[in-house]
Image: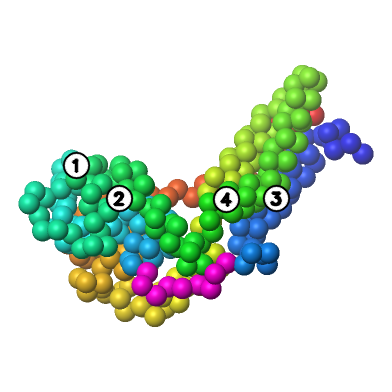
Amino acid sequence: MNPYDLTAGPFLAIYALAFAACLGFGLWWRQREPPSVFPPPPARTQGLDPVGWAYLAGGAVRAADTAAVGLLQSGQLKLDKKRNMLLPVPLADPPPASLAAYARRLKDPVSVADLSARLASAFEAVAADLVVRGLAFDPPTRLRRGWASAAPLLVLTVLGAIRILLGMARERPVGFIVGFTLLTLIAAVSLALKPPLARRAGREAVARHKDASSRLVRAPEADELMLAMALVGGGALFGTPYAAFAKMRQAVGGDGGGCGGGGGCGGGCGGCGS
């Protein structure tokens, strides 16, 4: 039987099941790490600084936050709470060597919202170091893995588009399937454009470091604040002099989780081009 001849209810039910299966496959594929002809180097974390841990654990946004906290602590930056700005401090002492590259890019005032973009070029070296350490995927591999995880959803998007065109040709309402197809496309693009950075070895290293640093994560001392920020994010700053910075960053840079599928197909019978 041709699935495109199904009535709206059965077709939507099949499409919803296919969406769940394709999304599940994509998420599973992102975590899978099959044997490679050219295996990565043995994982090494010795000497990895807090910004490196932050990039491995939370990507460029967390790395930017961690670098900013370090520069606030060292007196290179100050926070303008009224304008949500980070301002360079004139005549400040030279920054620690590990933060010098970030300090150079923050010589001019920057809004809290634009912090990650301002520091993006500095993180290219951080990402490359994580690859050399065997903790992260290189950019071409990330690109391939992203599109491979999205491929089933892209195929399903095409099938949904065909159903829409057939429904329009038959002068049937297609509202529900249009919504489902757009949801599928959004999920596919999200998987394709946001592939995971960390290898399994990198994820395991972060988990071990969190376990070994449980006291630090709960109640960091001043000299531990950057590492706590790197491992758990802005929550580490609450109760510290930098809590206002954490709140500002949450307000402008929070990650919105995006692919939760609502059950919007229940009982609709005229919205799928049948």
* Dot in front, 2 or 1: 1
Measured from the top left, where is residue 62 in percent x and y?
36, 56
Secondary structure mainly formed by the magenta segment: loop
Measured from the top left, where is residue 248 in percent x and y?
26, 49
Measured from the top left, where is residue 4 in percent x and y?
83, 33
* Between discs 4 and 2, the one toward the N terminus: 4
* Between discs 3 and 4, the one toward the N terminus: 3
Q: Which residue is mark 4?
A: 140
* Dot in front, 3 or 4: 4
Q: Nearer the viewer, residue 130 or 173?
A: 130
Are circles 2 and 1 on residues that touch, CB within 8 Å? no
Q: Nearer the viewer, residue 242 or 17?
A: 242
Residue at the (25%, 59%) spot, across then down: 99
Residue at the (24%, 42%) spot, across then down: 111
Residue found farthest to the left: 91
Amino acid residing under circle 4: Pro
Q: Look at the image and name its color scheme.
A: rainbow
* Between discs 1 and 3, the one toward the N terminus: 3
Are circles 2 and 3 on residues that touch, CB within 8 Å? no
* Dot in front, 1 or 3: 1
Mark 1 nearby-residue class (10 Å; few <14, some 14–19, many ≥20): few
Q: Which residue is mark 2?
A: 249
Residue at the (16%, 46%) spot, across then down: 87
- Find the magenta span and give its range: 40-48
Q: Which residue is mark 1?
A: 108
Residue 41 sits inside the magenta stretch: yes
Q: Which residue is mark 3?
A: 22
* Dot in front, 4 or 1: 4
Can residue 62 be spotted in the picture? no
Marks 3 and 4, how far apart at CA: 23 Å
* Between discs 4 and 1, the one toward the N terminus: 1
